[in-house]
Image (cartoon, rainbow, N blue to C red):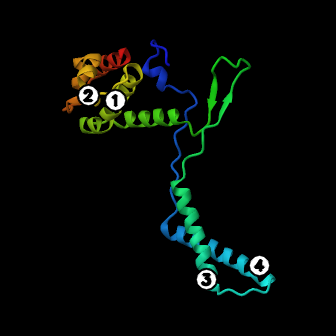
């Protein structure tokens, strides 16, 4: 459980943060060309092995089987779960709780997503309402869920009491303008009190 004195800034700050690299998936033509090349290589290897034992199988059947295996492998890889997070202890004290999380850490990924979306909403009011407001709502829901076992959707009456009218109205009323820095400071302090 987090310390009640921990602020949102403390939770979102990371001094070694690097911007995420966007990997472009290969084009469709290149992807299919790669699949056909792998199937052809597999066909050649299977036919060579069969010829060693003086067995004959139609080339088309072997190619179709290899192509099916390549496509099955691609499909399975696309729906596979991410690898588990590897944790390493830092320091000699086993009770200090210090961990260095791997690059696939779910919390770091969620916080990074929140940071990117919060930065993206710094423009006009429409962009703020579309991008930033839902992220702030997620943060409020997370704090409500961790501290009180509820969200704004599960128990709106109790959530409104906990959040306060200003923060509640800010999150649930479409913004006509981007809030001022003073308003944001008030909302963040209310969010931290949750």
Q: Nearer the viewer, mark 2 or mark 3?
A: 3
Determine whether the residue tagged by mark 2 lies in a helix, strand or loop: helix
**85 vs 61: above or below:** above
**Residue 88 % position (x, y):** 68, 30
Disc 1 to disc 2: CB gap under 8 Å: yes
Q: Residue at x 49, y 14 (%)?
A: 3
Indicate whether 191 appears above or below 88. above
Decide if residue 34 is in sight here: no
Q: Residue 21: give x, y in percent of width and height.
A: 53, 46
Q: Tell me how far mark 1 sits from mark 3, CA to CA.
A: 56 Å
The residue identified by callout 2 is: 171
Nearest to N terminus: mark 4 or mark 3: 4
According to the image, label 3 marks what residue? 61
Q: Label 4's element?
A: helix
Distance (Cα) linking label 1 and label 2: 8 Å
x, y percentage for residue 49?
77, 78
Between discs 1 and 2, the one toward the N terminus: 1
Which is more N-terminal, label 3 or label 2?
3
For this view, does 131 lie left or right of residue 97?
A: left
**Residue 49: which disc?**
4
């Amino acid at each position: 459980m987090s310390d009640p004195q921990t602020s949102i800034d403390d939770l979102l700050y990371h001094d070694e943060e690097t911007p995420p690299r966007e990997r472009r998936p290969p084009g469709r033509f290149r992807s299919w060309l790669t699949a056909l090349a792998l199937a052809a290589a597999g066909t050649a290897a299977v036919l060579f092995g069969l010829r060693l034992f003086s067995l004959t199988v139609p080339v088309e059947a072997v190619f179709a089987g290899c192509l099916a295996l390549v496509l099955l492998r691609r499909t399975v890889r696309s729906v596979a779960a991410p690898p588990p997070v590897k944790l390493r202890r830092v320091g000699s004290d086993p009770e200090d709780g210090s961990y260095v999380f791997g690059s696939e850490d779910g919390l770091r990924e969620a916080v990074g997503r929140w940071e990117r979306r919060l930065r993206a909403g710094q423009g006009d009011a429409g962009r703020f309402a579309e991008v930033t407001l839902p992220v702030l709502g997620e943060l409020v829901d997370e704090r409500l869920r961790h501290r009180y076992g509820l969200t704004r959707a599960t128990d709106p009456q109790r959530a409104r009491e906990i959040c306060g009218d200003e923060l509640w109205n800010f999150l649930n009323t479409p913004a006509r303008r981007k809030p001022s820095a003073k308003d944001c400071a008030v909302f963040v302090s209310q969010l931290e009190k949750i």
